[in-house]
Amino acid sequence: MLAVGLLSALAMIARLGVAPASRTFFAVCPRGLESVLALELRGPQVRAQNVEAANAGVWFDGSGQTGMAAVLWLRSANRVMELLSSARATPTRESPTDWFTKAQLYDFVRGSVDWETLLTPEACGVQSIEACTLACDATIGQVDRSLCNSHYTALEVKNALVDEMRQRHDGLRPSVDTENPMLPLQVHVHQDSAWLFRTLSPYGSMHRRGYRQAMHVAALRENLAAGLILQTGFGFDRPENLEPGAAPGFDPDSTVLCDPMCGSATLAVEAALIATETAPGLLRWGRIGKRLAQLADNEQSAPPPFCNWPDYSTSEWESLLETAEYAVRPLKMRIHLNDAHPGALALAQQAFDRLGFTDAATFSNADIADFEPPERPTLIVANPPWGRRIGRGDGAVSAAAAGRLRRQRADPRAEQRGGWQRDGGGRDRGGGGKDDRAGRGAGFSRDEDRFTEDR
């Protein structure tokens, strides 16, 4: 009933206890940041192979260590996943359209992967299969009516895996954990095709860095803010970070960054993390992550899911963390922040205090029309007020004031370096995005054998 595109060598090699040399991964990102994410993947920290931008994400190949490095270093990604299996459905009486049905999805999940090699009590450090945990998510494109709800599609994936494990373990089964599962799974179904992944990154989203205790009502997601900063060329000043033949960006150390409408300062914080070459994963699992957890009176983040998998090396992960710790540099750039709302500015100051960046920043509480930066900025970024946060006409006033700031007070190099963007109507706008909520959709790469997942 199914033409299974399983990488059958994966199961065989896992049985022999040897990690496969090359795997296929998909990193999810907000739409519009695919090119930035591709640059990150090709860069010296990850060194991915066969990098291929798609819709709302990027495909890449590499070893298990490549996938772990992506989880540690990627700034613009929401999630990093490894492809386990893919399949195309064939016509049935129940589905004359050739689209995947609920029954076909069940058979695909249960039979296309050797689950015994992926979820074992020994690797998870527990006594029985019942103590192993999993979680299942699903995204759907155009699907058969039996799969028209993503929640129930995810339940069908879970049922298939649980039934398979019950058969192998005398009726015993793994448990479901929706907070910190040992094996997070993701399935995507579109028409006659299905893809099954395991998620390397923490369950949820990689945008949660951990440096914010409270959220501004309209704060940008951290990975979106980082992607927007990277789009200006910031941090791409060294040849190893660039595409062949690409013009270099500008040096973070000599940058004077200004955000006249900073809110909780997500854009500025992410710029500082880029300038210090602080891997985002260190904020969860490194020394700085331990300090952030202590300040919040919380436990440090649990290790990523792949630390429970027999075909991934925890010693390689610890080596990656150690290398990333040594890569952190002092913050030399200057940052000038302003916001008209004292509460938002207090959140900005808290974030800088928690990360130890306060000495490099100034904070001003003024209307943008009255804001005078202490020195001429070379990079101006902003996420202007929008939607319900502003009264009628206030957005135009803020945009006009920001435009005056750029023209009258910015270093002339700022415009040359792409620190300001224009919208489709030719009006000036800041570097912040207006909506970081990703929709759901599916698209295909040029070989029509890979999907793009967007949540």
Image: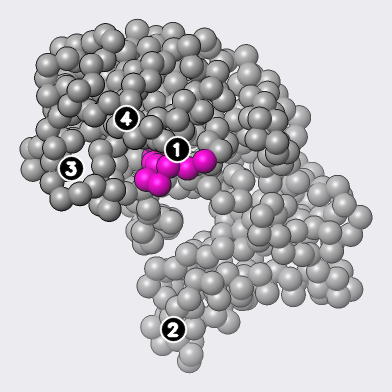
Q: Label 2 crowding class (10 Å Cα cut-off): few <14, some 14-19, many 20+?
A: few
Q: Locate the N terminus and report the quarter of the image it occupies.
A: bottom right
The range drawn in magenta is: 214-225
User: Looking at the figure, which quarter contains the C terminus?
Assistant: bottom left
**Gap between marks 2 and 3, in whole Å?**
44 Å
- Is tag 2's residue or tag 4's residue first in the polypeptide sequence? 2
Give the Cα distance between marks 2 and 4.
Answer: 50 Å
Decide whether the magenta segment is chiefly helix, strand or loop. loop
Three-letter code for the amino acid on which mark 4 is drawn: Asp
Q: Label 2: state its secondary structure.
A: helix
Mark 2 in CB contact with mark 3 (< 8 angstroms)? no
| Residue 395 numbered tag | 3
* In the rendered image, the vertical position of residue 10 relative to residue 359, given as above or below: below
Residue at the disc numbered 2 = 145
CA–CA distance in space, label 3 to label 1: 23 Å
Q: Is residue 445 magenta?
A: no
1 and 2 marks in contact (CB < 8 Å): no
Name the amino acid, label 1.
Glu
